[in-house]
Image (cartoon, rainbow, N blue to C red):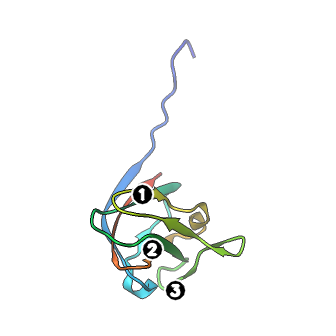
């Protein structure tokens, strides 16, 4: 390639603050179908420490996301973040359920 490096463009999408409830019904959906991965950041002042992930194939019926029989979770504390678990890639729609209600910033990688 004559010393040139081929650049591969990745599409990044940062969503507005997403509501996290203590139940799936109280949490806002995240459209994850076109993402390869992503991360979440607890906004300043939020008090939750763990997010448990729920997934849906139709955007209406959500089930717990599991990996090898264990619930997919993300440890999180403001103002830091962590990755969305790999097991979530099996679902086009996600909901993050927290041990407390609040908001997260979601960044998706295409």
Q: Residues under labels 3 and 2: Cα distance?
A: 14 Å
Q: State the image quarter where residue 10 is shown.
A: top left
Picture coordinates of residue 70 (x, y %)? 66, 74
Label 1 element class? strand
Sequence-wise, the earlier of marks 3 and 2 is 3
Q: Nearer the viewer, residue 14 or 103?
A: 103
Q: State the image quarter where residue 71 is shown.
A: bottom right
Question: To which residue does mark 1 refer?
Answer: 81
Q: State the image quarter where residue 24 is shown.
A: bottom left
Which numbered dot is residue 61? 3
Position of the N terminus, as image quadrant, is top right
Disc 1 residue crowd, few under 14, some 14–19, many 20+, Cα 10 Å:
some
Label 2 element class? strand
Sequence-wise, the earlier of marks 1 and 2 is 1
Furthest-right residue in view? 68
Drawn side of residue 6 relative to residue 90, left or right: left
- Tag nearer the camera, 3 or 1: 1
Picture coordinates of residue 33 (x, y %)? 50, 64
- Seen in the picture, residue 89 relative to 56 is either above or below; the reply is above
- Tag nearer the camera, 3 or 2: 2
- Seen in the picture, residue 70 relative to 25 is either above or below; the reply is above
- Seen in the picture, residue 103 relative to 84 is either above or below; the reply is below
Drawn side of residue 28 relative to residue 6, left or right: left
Disc 2 residue crowd, few under 14, some 14–19, many 20+, Cα 10 Å:
many
Tell me the residue at 44%/64% (across/down). Answer: 76
Q: Are marks 3 and 2 in contact (CB under 8 Å)?
A: no
- Tag nearer the camera, 1 or 2: 1
Which numbered dot is residue 96? 2
Picture coordinates of residue 21 (x, y %)? 38, 81
Sequence-wise, the earlier of marks 3 and 1 is 3
Drawn side of residue 102 relative to residue 31, left or right: left
């Amino acid at each position: 390639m004559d010393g040139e490096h081929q650049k591969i463009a990745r599409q990044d999408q940062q969503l507005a603050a997403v509501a996290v409830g203590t139940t799936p019904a109280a949490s806002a959906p995240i459209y994850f179908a076109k993402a390869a991965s992503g991360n979440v950041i607890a906004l300043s002042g939020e008090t939750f420490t763990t997010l448990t992930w729920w997934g849906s194939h139709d955007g209406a019926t959500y089930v717990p996301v599991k990996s090898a029989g264990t619930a997919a979770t993300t440890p999180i504390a403001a103002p830091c973040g962590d990755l969305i678990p790999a097991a979530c890639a099996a679902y086009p729609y996600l909901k993050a359920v927290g041990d407390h209600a609040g908001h997260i910033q979601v960044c998706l990688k295409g």
